[in-house]
Image (cartoon, grey):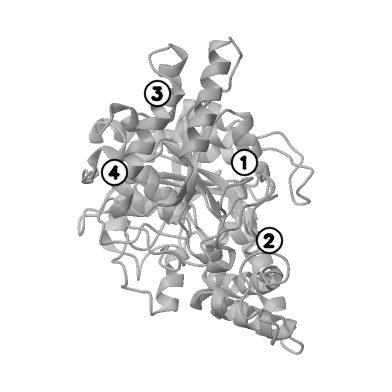
Amino acid sequence: MSDLTRKTAVELADLMSTGETSSVEITQAHLDRIAGTDTAVHAFLHVDTEGALAQAADVDSRRAAGEELGPLAGVPLALKDVLTQEGVPTTAGSKILEGWKPPYDSTVVKRLRAAGIVILGKTNMDEFAMGSSTENSAYGTTHNPWDLNRIPGGSGGGSSAAISAYQAPLAIGTDTGGSIRQPAAFTGTVGIKPTYGGTSRYGLIALASSLDTPGPCARTTLDAALLHEAIAGWDPMDSTSIKQDVPPVVAAARNGDVTGMRIGVVKELGGEGYQPGVEARFHDAVELLTKLGAEVVEVSCPHFQYALPAYYLILPSEASSNLAKFDAMRFGLRVGDDGENDAEKVMSLTREAGFGDEVKRRIMLGTHALSSGYYDAYYGQAQKVRTLIARDFARAYEQVDVLVSPATPTTAFAIGDRVNDPIAMYKNDLCTIPSNLAGNAAASFPVGLADEDGMPVGFHVMAPVMRDDLLYQVGAALESALADQWGGVLMSKAPELEVTR
């Protein structure tokens, strides 16, 4: 493996600033790594080799000309295939968008370009972000680099796997119910769900508009903070965007001092159904935070137990509305347009052929929940529960600065293990969903390996709205304290992938 692919984003940026290497060399090293490992991992749906090298060459030229560049300029990144990138295939993991090339950049992509970050390509995902394992992709399953027989999480399994496989030092994911944090937990990486509205949804192919949140993925807390700062901030193109300054996430990641911080362990997120090795690493991390000077107390959030059913009414309802646009009339797949079928038949045939089973399941559930006579009983009630969950958070934050829990009830499970049991699959998001319903900031940080299977465990941190910096403060404290035990980041313990040529 090239030494360059083992470097963090900060280390790569330092090497470029001193002239020891170039963005083109770094980008080529990661493209070679993708070529040698992605047959096994399948993290990418599209690798933009020509475009990435052109972006890298442009950064090198600007640096040589003495232009002042951002802290991540020239560093490669993997982009979840749910954000539009002009001229680059964007499918959202679905056959219904196969071959579609957007005519515009999403705001996140515009900001990545402005920061000089090199986009390597688009990563695999559950179709329209509906899933917890990346097994629902229309283009095949992504494999966990820690154990190729296991899932990498979902829906953003491709982005987390790309980082874990050293195919990219940075990635962008989106989090609707845990789709950044859960894959991060399963792959031993850092995954951040910013405050809803803190990052722009413009150009994000919508799943559930009141929940979707783009965010950073990385191998270290500081790398994630620098990427967060690059993509965050108010966007007039997004009506839900928050018009406030970006929280001081980079300063918090460099600080990592939790002395006097009040940390609340959520009573309802643990116990029965949680893997012993996951709970053991969680309690180890809590004990470590106490030794670092934090004050730890137990906090009850009683309505969190209703988050999962509420979420699986709100999300399908919004999804059924958002996915109505895929009708064969304007863009994407078109089936049955042979002159014999009318528009309604073509639409029906196209949606039947283009959507996978999980997408159809959620569209039907959401359409039913929104239908006349059922709206108040289902969708309306779920929104009331959402309000109660937000109130639980508000009361908790009167007592503590952040809340913590395991990121997931278990470690990564075997491919195919839960694909025929949607309820078991949905339970992967028990810990992450409440933050999406309330819109606050949350993150998963690696805190070790479960004793039973040697797979990574994630530590979940939840912070108030627009206090994203608190996430990084806790993450940096844990990372610094654990680095001595691990000899670096947790990824240093991952098994080496076989490289093919």
Quarter of the picture containing the N terminus is top left
Which residue is label 1 attached to?
109
Q: Position of residue 332 (x, y in %)?
A: 63, 65
How many angstroms separate mark 3 from mark 1 (CA)?
Answer: 23 Å
Image side of residue 37 versus residue 433, left or right: left
Q: Circle 3 sits in a helix, a strand or a loop, which is it?
A: helix
For the C terminus, which image quadrant? top left
- Picture disc at residue 11: 3
Q: Residue at x 53, y 65 (%)?
A: 94
Q: Looking at the rendered structure, which numbered label has been put on residue 36?
A: 4
Q: How far apart in space, not on screen, are marks 4 and 2 (Cα)?
A: 37 Å
User: Depth-wise, is mark 4 or mark 3 nearer the camera?
Assistant: 4
Mark 1 or mark 4: which comes first in sequence? 4
Which badge, 3 or 2, is on the more N-terminal residue? 3
- Residue named by callout 2: 209
Q: Residues within 10 Å of mark 4 (few under 14, many from 20)?
A: some
In the rendered image of this protein, does residue 205 appear above or below residue 23?
below
Amino acid identity at mark 4: Gly
N-terminal of the two: label 1 or label 2? 1
Residue 259 visible? The answer is no
> Separation of disc 1 and disc 4 at Cα?
26 Å
109 vs 274, nearest the viewer = 109
